[in-house]
């Protein structure tokens, strides 16, 4: 049986669907290796390729709307600098929170780029060409309706994997993004741990607030995932004695930290490089104590992000990386920009299930 998705192509879902209950394919920003990240066409493609879960990164607009965007900036993936040249802050960045939803809907969305001087340079040259075709930003509610609509029309039950982006930043701006995201998820029927939904965040304190305060208030109890970043990357800020400081993630990479996380969250999302010993070489791959500890404390690991066009030097192709993570590290799921390749690897390696 075939389905036409947003004019992209015909896909045979029954053939491509990934039937496993165990090893999950999480489409990172959709099938972002093929189409501009987080656009609805990228989500449709990931869905058709057989992903088990589709990821939504969420930020808030000036008028308190939730939009699906990875950055709380607009300038990496849109023409905001051309359409609103005077609306950047002192740091030169264009913040989604300074724009209304109506303004953001006017922007043309593109494959991600960076500037070299005034020249736009595509971050992943082999991917969908930048500034081609027509893509737009959409809301979280629109994406949930899109996925639920596909679930209805295909008879499948593909899940959502929603990330609350930078709650500390939204708090500084006077907004409670976590509460708004939870209310929207509840509105669309995601409330229980048995629902096909994971809630992810890099902010440990915010995840605990969600668990202990917000979800009880709203009658919710979703599966919560602690995302883990390198401290040096300044991913999260935390308020200490009245001052905002860079959050120190180092404790999460120790066996003791993993034990603590096993009691406070339902899963962890580390950068996959954290699972592989830095001395690993082709054919000689060793795992870090983080992996052993997570298995010991039965804490599911969903590492990010497998990209076939950005491989570490200890593998020679993406299949080897799927093997290292799904089989050697025995992770129950992973984020990938290329869901079709993960689905294909799992289909060829049933013993890894
Ligand atoms: O949420 C998992 C992974 O997406 C985390 O990295 O920066 O792509 O959101 P990022
Ligand atoms: Ca994410």
Image: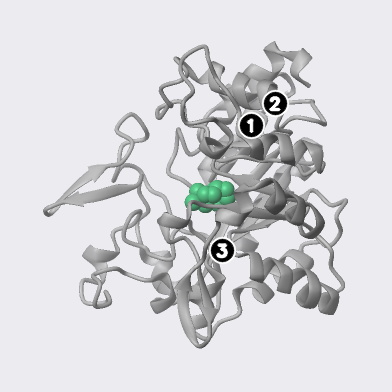
Q: Secondary structure at mark 2?
A: helix
Q: Which mark is residue 13?
A: 2
Q: Which residue is mark 1?
A: 48
Query: Which residue corresponds to the image point at 78% horizontal and 69% vertical from the top-left?
Result: 211
Please rate how many residues cluster around mark 3, counting C-alpha atoms within 10 Å: few if below 14, some from 14 to 19, many from 20: some
Query: Which residue corresponds to the image point at 46% horizontal and 34% vertical from the top-left?
Result: 33
* Labelled pair 2, 1 in contact (Cβ < 8 Å): yes
Residue 268 place in picture, x, y as percent = 68, 48
Instruction: For residue 39, say whether it is visible.
Output: no
**Is residue 325 depicted above or below 67 in this figure?**
above
Query: Which residue corresponds to the image point at 23% horizontal and 70% vertical from the top-left?
Result: 92
Quadrant into which the N terminus falls: top right
Which residue is more in the foreground, 14 or 52?
A: 52
Q: Which residue is mark 3?
A: 139
* Labelled pair 3, 1 in contact (Cβ < 8 Å): no
Identify the coloring: one colour
Closer to the chain start, of discs 2 and 1, is 2
Query: Which residue corresponds to the image point at 60% horizontal and 22% vertical from the top-left?
Result: 324
Q: Secondary structure at mark 1?
A: helix
Q: Residue furthest left?
A: 117
Quadrant assignment, res 90? bottom left
Closer to the chain start, of discs 3 and 1, is 1
- Number of numbered discs overlaid on the protein picture: 3
Instruction: For residue 124, say whether it is visible.
Output: yes
């Amino acid at each position: 049986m075939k389905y036409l998705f947003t004019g992209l192509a015909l896909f045979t879902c029954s053939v491509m669907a990934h039937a496993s209950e165990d090893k999950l394919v999480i489409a990172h920003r959709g099938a972002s290796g093929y189409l501009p990240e987080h656009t609805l066409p990228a989500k449709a493609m990931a869905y058709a390729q057989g992903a088990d879960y589709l990821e939504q990164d969420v930020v808030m607009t000036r008028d308190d709307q939730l939009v699906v965007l990875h950055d709380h900036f607009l300038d990496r993936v849109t023409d905001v600098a051309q359409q609103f040249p005077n609306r950047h802050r002192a740091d030169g960045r264009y913040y989604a929170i300074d724009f209304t939803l109506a303004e953001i809907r006017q922007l043309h969305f593109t494959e991600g780029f960076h500037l070299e001087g005034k020249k736009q340079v595509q971050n992943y040259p082999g991917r969908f060409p930048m500034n081609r075709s027509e893509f737009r930003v959409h809301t979280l509610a629109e994406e949930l309706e899109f996925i639920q609509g596909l679930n209805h029309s295909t008879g499948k039950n593909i899940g959502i994997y929603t990330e609350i982006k930078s709650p500390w930043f939204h708090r500084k701006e006077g907004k409670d993004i976590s509460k708004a995201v939870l209310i929207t998820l509840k509105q669309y029927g995601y409330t229980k741990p048995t629902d096909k939904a994971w809630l992810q965040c890099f902010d440990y304190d915010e995840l605990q607030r969600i668990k202990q305060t917000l979800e009880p208030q709203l009658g919710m109890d979703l599966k919560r995932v602690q995302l883990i970043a390198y401290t040096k990357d300044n991913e999260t800020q935390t308020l200490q004695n009245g001052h905002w400081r860079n959050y120190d993630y180092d404790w999460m990479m120790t066996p003791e930290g993993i034990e603590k996380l096993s009691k406070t969250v339902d899963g962890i999302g580390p950068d996959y490089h954290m699972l592989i010993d830095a001395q690993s070489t082709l054919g000689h791959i060793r795992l870090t104590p983080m992996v052993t500890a997570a298995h010991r404390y039965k804490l599911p690991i969903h590492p990010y992000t497998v990209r076939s066009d950005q491989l570490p030097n200890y593998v020679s192709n993406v299949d080897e990386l799927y093997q290292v993570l799904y089989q050697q590290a025995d992770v129950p799921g992973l984020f990938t920009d290329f869901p079709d390749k993960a689905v294909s690897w799992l289909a060829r390696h049933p013993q890894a299930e």
